[in-house]
Amino acid sequence: MKPPSSIQTSEFDSSDEEPIEDEQTPIHISWLSLSRVNCSQFLGLCALPGCKFKDVRRNVQKDTEELKSCGIQDIFVFCTRGELSKYRVPNLLDLYQQCGIITHHHPVADGGTPDIASCCEIMEELTTCLTLIHCYGGLGRSCLVAACLLLYLSDTISPEQAIDSLRDLRGSGAIQTIKQYSYLHEFRDILAAHLSSRDSQSRSVSR
């Protein structure tokens, strides 16, 4: 499925119940084409929907409705529950589920990386339906996972090419920390070791 050519927005809400109005601009989704890894799908990346922090004041209900109107079926969330509370969307996961969106919560510390077992699970869960992933800013953890997906789906793309693809899409801030950069360069070797160990354990149990 291809991403929608436009995002429908609800009518401007002129309510003055809050002293500071929420942003009315549609939530920005960057669509990563997976065609270079022989897949016809797209993967969406965005910042945290509904976030209210410093000068950012998004409306969580409006953002969620827009995501639903895009046809998004699965959302992967990499924020911790502490972050969701800090950015004033403590019930975001429940709201996604109430809207009929399948929600995958894989919390990763800001600036950090998932352990390889968790990352492997994420790779296996990323299905062929229209999927969105996000953390807080949609630059560090989300771009790391998207880059790992490119490496997971193709043996020919290099870590640097994966990074370049995400930076072309999301800006120079994509893949933010040395830890994330190193993780991506070691991903294939660590993944191979993890899968080998998992297969060995599986064979041992089946005997």
Image: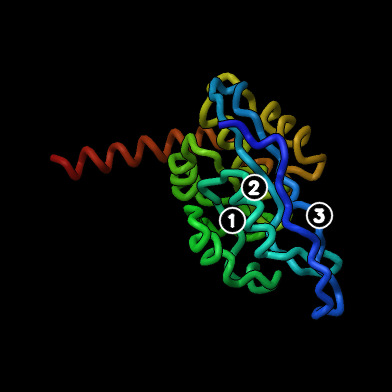
Label 2 CA crowd tier, 10 Å (few <14, some 14–19, many 20+): many
* Residue 86 locus on image (x, y percent): 69, 73
Kindly state the secondary structure of the residue where label 3 is placed. loop
Q: How far apart are marks 1 and 3 (CA)?
A: 24 Å
| Front residue (pair 193, 129) | 129
Residue 142: mark: 2
Closer to the chain start, of discs 1 and 3, is 3
Count the marks.
3
Q: Can residue 205 be seen in this view?
A: yes
Q: Quadrant of residue 60?
A: bottom right
Q: Residue at x 43, y 36 (%)?
A: 193
133 sits left or right of 126 in the view: right
Q: Which residue is drawn at 19% across and 45% down?
A: 205
Q: How far apart are marks 2 and 3 (CA)?
A: 22 Å
Identify which amino acid the numbered label 2 is placed on: Ser
Please state, as top left, top right, bottom left or bottom right, where the N terminus lies in the image.
top right
State if disc 2 and disc 1 touch (CB < 8 Å): yes
Residue tagged by mark 1? 78
Identify which amino acid the numbered label 1 is placed on: Phe
Q: In this view, does 196 lie above or below 37?
A: below
Q: Is residue 90 above or below residue 29?
A: below
40 sits left or right of 193 in the view: right
Closer to the chain start, of discs 2 and 3, is 3
Q: In this view, does 172 lie above or below 13?
A: above
Kindly state the secondary structure of the residue where label 1 is placed. loop
Q: Residue at x 49, y 41 (%)?
A: 126
Residue 25: mark: 3
195 sits left or right of 85 in the view: left
Identify which amino acid the numbered label 3 is placed on: Thr
| Front residue (pair 99, 119) | 99
Label 3 CA crowd tier, 10 Å (few <14, some 14–19, many 20+): few
Q: Is residue 47 above or below residue 51?
A: above
